[in-house]
Image (cartoon, coloured by chain):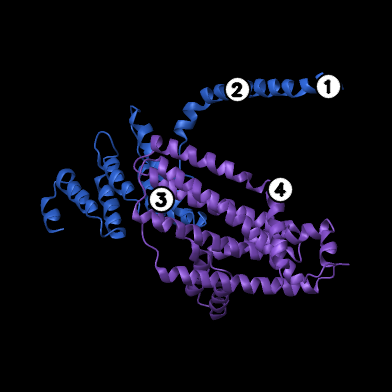
Chain colours: A purple, B blue
């Protein structure tokens, strides 16, 4: 593959920074400072727990909002502004353009998440407790959040290839919520007496990305260890699923009539 | 518009915003004064099923557990100042908290105190025992919870044999 996706990715990242996407970091910082000061006053014994839970949940929610709402406009915006035609006139394949756009948003999310992780570390330091061995699992939880965001970004980009931003956001959000409830859907099938329902729920369980796999916030907040096998399994799961979605997006985008 | 006029516009807007915020604050304090009693009586749980709340949390159950625990502390503290203490919501709130985050040890330990206290609590040692037993089931390695259960049987229920063999 040529250097084109890298160039598109860097420019997508620059565009996001120019659009003041990273301003959400200010809100995150204010929230963490507020929580660090306030929680000790209104609750009992959960200062550190709240900082970890709130910090990781905020990283996840902010990232999700960014991945969905920027992701759904990645291709649509280029078509709407007609900049895509200028781009595709250059020696760049449509699939390379998509991979570049995906990489650019992912880079934005990684930078954003890294700054929020630093903010979380600072808030933990502020609540007056030195870092302990159990805190070493917090970066793993952040890594899992990034894997989850990589998946959501790929889905948003896929829908962005053939649908309007509004509908794409709804589809992506719908798949995310279904993915969170994946194990419940399979359980419903187990309770059902009808074999077709059992089969259908099982198919949904395996087809829809299982976002529940990546949620270790509660475990990490209580200082419990994450099995190493889960780290590589989740990494492999995200890589396989993202590849699958990007291949599907490329196939759809390649057939798209841009005239 | 002259340059000086252009410079005046943001200042007048700023003053207007501050005045409007001041008026809103005064109005809100009047509304609060009128509805204070009503709000105190009306405190209730709109969602009482811990499992439903857990599902609706979309995976952020641990954070929601912390929020519910803070609500337990606030609820208990606010009831202590009342002449006719009523702790009806204490058990449902603790039930939700410990379902959302079964590892939140502090909720079992302090929750048991809030529930079992006779004068300063709900005087429901049976529910306190239930709460601590649930905590032991979810956290079998935490010896402090066994100690708390022993305390409840020994001092509150005066049931000495149960704790000796328990």
Q: Is residue A58 visible?
A: no
Pointer 1 with pointer 3, Cβ within 8 A: no
Tag 2 secondary structure: helix
Q: CA distance from mark 4 to mark 3?
A: 44 Å
Please, is residue B37 above or below residue A22 in the view? above
For disc 1, the chain is B
- Whether discs 4 and 3 lie on one chain: the answer is no
Tag 3 secondary structure: helix
Structural crowding at the residue carrying mark 1, measured as other residues with C-alpha within 10 Å and reported as few (<14), some (14–19) or many (≥20): few
Please, is residue A252 above or below residue B19 in the view? below
Mark 1 against mark 2, which lies toward the viewer?
1
Residue at left offset 45%, top offset 32%: B41
- Which mark, by number, is residue B96? 3
- Which mark, by number, is residue B27? 2
- Whether discs 1 and 3 lie on one chain: the answer is yes
Residue closer to the observer: B49 or B96 = B96
Q: CA distance from mark 1 to mark 3?
A: 61 Å
Expressed as whole percent of the image width and height from the top left, the position of residue A183 reads 49, 68
Residue A107 left/right relative to A89: left
- Tell me which numbered mark, 1 or 3, is placed earlier along the sequence: 1
- Tell me which numbered mark, 3 or 2, is placed earlier along the sequence: 2
Pointer 3 with pointer 2, Cβ within 8 A: no
Residue indicated by mark 4 = A18
Residue indicated by mark 1 = B3
For disc 2, the chain is B
């Amino acid at each position: 593959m040529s250097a084109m996706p890298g160039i598109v990715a860097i420019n997508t990242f620059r565009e996001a920074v120019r659009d003041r996407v990273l301003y959400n970091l200010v809100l995150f910082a204010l929230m963490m400072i507020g929580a660090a000061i306030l929680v000790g006053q209104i609750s009992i014994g959960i200062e550190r727990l709240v900082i970890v839970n709130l910090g990781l949940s905020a990283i996840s929610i902010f990232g999700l909002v960014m991945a969905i709402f920027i992701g759904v406009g990645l291709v649509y915006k280029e078509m709407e502004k007609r900049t895509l035609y200028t781009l595709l006139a250059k020696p760049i394949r449509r699939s390379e353009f998509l991979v570049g756009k995906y990489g650019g948003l992912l880079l934005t999310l990684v930078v954003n998440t890294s700054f929020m992780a630093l903010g979380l570390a600072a808030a933990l330091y502020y609540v007056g407790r030195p870092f302990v061995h159990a805190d070493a699992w917090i970066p793993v939880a952040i890594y899992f959040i990034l894997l989850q965001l990589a998946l959501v970004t790929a889905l948003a980009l896929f829908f962005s290839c053939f649908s309007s931003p509004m509908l794409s956001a709804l589809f992506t959000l719908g798949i995310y919520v279904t993915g969170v409830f994946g194990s419940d859907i399979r359980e419903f099938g187990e309770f059902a007496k009808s074999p077709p329902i059992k089969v259908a729920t099982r198919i949904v369980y395996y087809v829809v990305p299982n976002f529940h796999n990546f949620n270790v916030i509660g475990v990490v907040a209580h200082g419990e260890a994450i099995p190493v096998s889960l780290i590589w399994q989740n990494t492999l799961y995200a890589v396989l699923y993202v590849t699958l979605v990007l291949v599907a997006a490329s196939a759809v985008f390649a057939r798209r009539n841009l005239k | 518009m002259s340059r000086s006029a252009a410079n005046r516009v943001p200042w007048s807007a700023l003053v207007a915003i501050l005045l409007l915020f001041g008026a809103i604050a005064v109005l809100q304090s009047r509304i609060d004064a009128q509805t204070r009693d009503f709000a105190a009586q009306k405190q209730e749980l709109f969602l009482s099923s811990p499992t439903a709340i857990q599902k609706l949390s979309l995976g952020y159950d641990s954070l929601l557990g912390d929020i519910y625990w803070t609500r337990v502390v606030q609820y208990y503290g606010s009831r202590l100042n009342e002449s006719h203490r009523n702790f009806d919501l204490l058990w449902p709130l603790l039930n939700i908290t410990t379902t959302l985050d079964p590892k939140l040890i502090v909720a079992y330990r302090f929750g048991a105190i809030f529930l079992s206290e006779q004068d300063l609590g709900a005087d429901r040692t049976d529910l306190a025992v239930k709460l601590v037993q649930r905590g032991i089931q979810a956290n079998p390695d935490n010896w402090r919870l066994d100690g708390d259960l022993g305390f409840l049987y020994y001092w509150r229920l005066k049931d000495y044999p149960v704790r000796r063999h328990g």
